[in-house]
């Protein structure tokens, strides 16, 4: 077995619906909504976005959250870290579906550098009665344990490597127990304990941890998800056990509907076996069969990789785009989409993805290797259009000016627009984050952020930004109109109607037409 995240990578899936409302931007920058796709003109681009009603995880945690936690840690801003992490766990209290996102976001602390241990120690010293630093350091030790062991098969791994792994795992378990002494409802702490038990083959210890965790959080999905690994045939279990385990969990599905998603785990396991045998067509059939239960980021990621191996790059891109929309802080997603984009000769976009993967995990050798390759590739003469090269030159000029004027608002606006023109949406988003920090009441900045996030399929984040803007400007009809369009694209037509009615009440001209379309959708539901 591989690291902790690989234990959860195989068993998640979500229900999905096809989008019914289209949104596109014309050559003048105007946003349009329609229940029919636009005409395929040179100046019109259609982005196909799946319904976010399928995202039963709630609001997706973006990569910026992970990067923020990393930054705060290195800045030793421990009080703010405690607040940020406490807020994440409080979200679980109000919505149990957030368990998985919190489980994933703690990987921000999986630094593969023992030199950072004193920072964790200092965090604990300054917060002796908080669970957050103990839980974070446990993730850190867990990662060091796997790095010590390596990822080769057991017969190619030295005893000294196993010994070092167990020593780090022991430290991780000590920290996890301390964290649980402060807060018994830390589902991700139980998950990490089960992952450690799974790695060392301690099935009884895993079962004991599961039973105790479920006595505290009986409706937990992620704890069962991690334990499911013990039940796979390759580790001594069976598909019958997997099915029975999933079936038994359904008595709590009225509290946590995500428990229904455990039912297709056996298909994913079978698909992985066919992948290992390089029988990719059969694997694709099983992954697709599992997706009949609905979409899930890790499962889409697996099928996307499988399409890559089959040479079907467009389908691979579709799956990886959707995976990133549902879970935006997994470096593997960006790494593999970068590989696919390179196959399609879109080196600029591929570089953006590998750069994001690098920011999320700068220790991964394969990420660094591809990053170096793409750094050379995008500098090769003849790549990119003349217009793109002109935009690149202008960006370089702006970069030089920003060195002397780091807070010059107009420069960030120009650069964001240039990045958008180059389809470097990740970089455009970063500039817009800066602009919104400078002027959090500027409608145009939020509108530009809407366009940029839309191009990245980050629809839930669009809603978050409009919510933020409306705190400052609660009577701006334009904001309600724009947010209504996003709700419509997510097929949440009830919320869309609420916003469009509010826009009309506030005097928005032109909102009535969109209201009629949403009203038809509500009546057909």
Image (cartoon, rainbow, N blue to C red):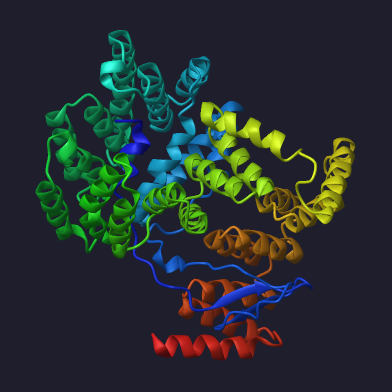
Residue 479 seen in this snapshot? no
| Residue 258 spot, x, y in % from top left | 29, 58
Residue 169 in view, yes or no: yes
Residue situated in front as seen by the camera: 453 or 318: 318
Q: Is residue 179 above or below residue 218?
A: above
Quadrant of the image for the C terminus?
Answer: bottom left
Splitting the image into 4 quarters, where does residue 157 fall? top left
Q: Residue at x 46, y 46 (%)?
A: 87
The reply, left or right, for residue 168 in relation to residue 353 is left
Quarter containing the N terminus: top left
Q: In the figure, 387 relative to 486: above or below?
A: above
Q: Is residue 366 above or below residue 349?
A: above
Residue nearest the viewer, comparing 265 with 165: 265
Query: How far from the left and from the top, in percent, is residue 478?
Result: 69, 76
122 to the left or right of 137: right
Who's the residue at 32% across and 55% down the image?
287
Query: What residue sits 86% from the left and 51% below the top?
Result: 390
């Amino acid at each position: 077995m591989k690291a902790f995240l690989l234990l959860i990578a195989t068993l998640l899936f979500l229900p999905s619906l096809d989008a019914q409302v289209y949104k596109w931007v014309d050559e003048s920058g105007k946003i349009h909504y329609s229940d029919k796709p636009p005409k395929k003109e040179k100046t019109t681009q259609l982005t196909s976005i799946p319904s976010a009603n399928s995202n039963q995880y709630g609001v997706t945690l973006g990569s910026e959250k992970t990067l923020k936690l990393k930054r705060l840690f290195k800045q030793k801003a421990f009080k703010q870290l405690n607040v940020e992490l406490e807020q994440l766990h409080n979200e679980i209290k109000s919505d149990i579906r957030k368990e998985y996102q919190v489980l994933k976001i703690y990987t921000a602390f999986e630094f593969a550098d023992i030199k950072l241990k004193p920072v964790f120690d200092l965090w604990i010293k300054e917060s002796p009665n908080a669970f957050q630093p103990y839980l974070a350091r446990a993730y850190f030790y867990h990662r060091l344990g796997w790095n010590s062991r390596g990822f080769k098969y057991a017969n190619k791994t030295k005893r000294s490597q196993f010994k070092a792994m167990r020593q780090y795992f022991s430290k991780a378990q000590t920290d996890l127990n301390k964290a649980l002494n402060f807060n018994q409802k830390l589902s991700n702490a139980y998950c990490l304990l089960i992952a450690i038990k799974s790695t060392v083959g301690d099935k009884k210890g895993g079962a004991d941890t599961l039973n105790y965790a479920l006595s505290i959080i009986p409706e937990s999905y992620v704890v069962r998800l991690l334990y499911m690994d013990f039940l796979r045939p390759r580790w001594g279990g069976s598909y019958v056990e997997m099915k029975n385990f999933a079936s038994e969990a359904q008595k709590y599905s009225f509290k946590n509907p995500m428990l229904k998603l455990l039912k297709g785990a056996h298909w994913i396991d079978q698909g992985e076996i066919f992948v290992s045998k390089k029988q990719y067509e059969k694997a694709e059939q099983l992954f697709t069969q599992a997706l009949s239960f609905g979409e899930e980021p890790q499962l889409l990621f697996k099928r996307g990789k499988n399409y890559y191996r089959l040479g079907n790059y467009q389908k691979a891109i579709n799956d990886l785009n959707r995976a990133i929309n549902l879970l935006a802080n997994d470096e593997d997603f960006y790494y593999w989409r970068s590989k696919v984009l390179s196959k399609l000769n879109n080196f600029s976009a591929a570089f953006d993805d590998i750069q994001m993967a690098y920011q999320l995990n700068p220790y991964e050798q394969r990420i660094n290797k591809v990053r170096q390759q793409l750094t050379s590739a995008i500098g090769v003469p003849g790549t990119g259009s003349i217009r793109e090269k002109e935009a690149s030159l202008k960006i370089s000029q702006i970069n030089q000016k920003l060195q002397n004027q780091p807070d010059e608002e107009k420069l960030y606006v120009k650069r964001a627009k240039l990045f958008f023109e180059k389809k470097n949406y990740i970089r455009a988003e970063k500039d817009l984050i800066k602009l919104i920090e400078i002027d959090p009441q500027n409608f145009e900045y939020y509108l530009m952020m809407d366009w940029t996030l839309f191009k990245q399929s980050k629809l839930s984040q669009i809603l978050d930004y409009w919510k933020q803007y409306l705190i400052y400007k609660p009577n701006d009809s334009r904001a309600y109109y724009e947010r209504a369009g996003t709700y419509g694209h997510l097929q949440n037509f009830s919320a869309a109607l609420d916003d469009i009615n509010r826009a009309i009440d506030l005097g928005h001209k032109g909102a009535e037409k969109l209201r009629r379309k949403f009203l038809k959708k509500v009546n057909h539901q």
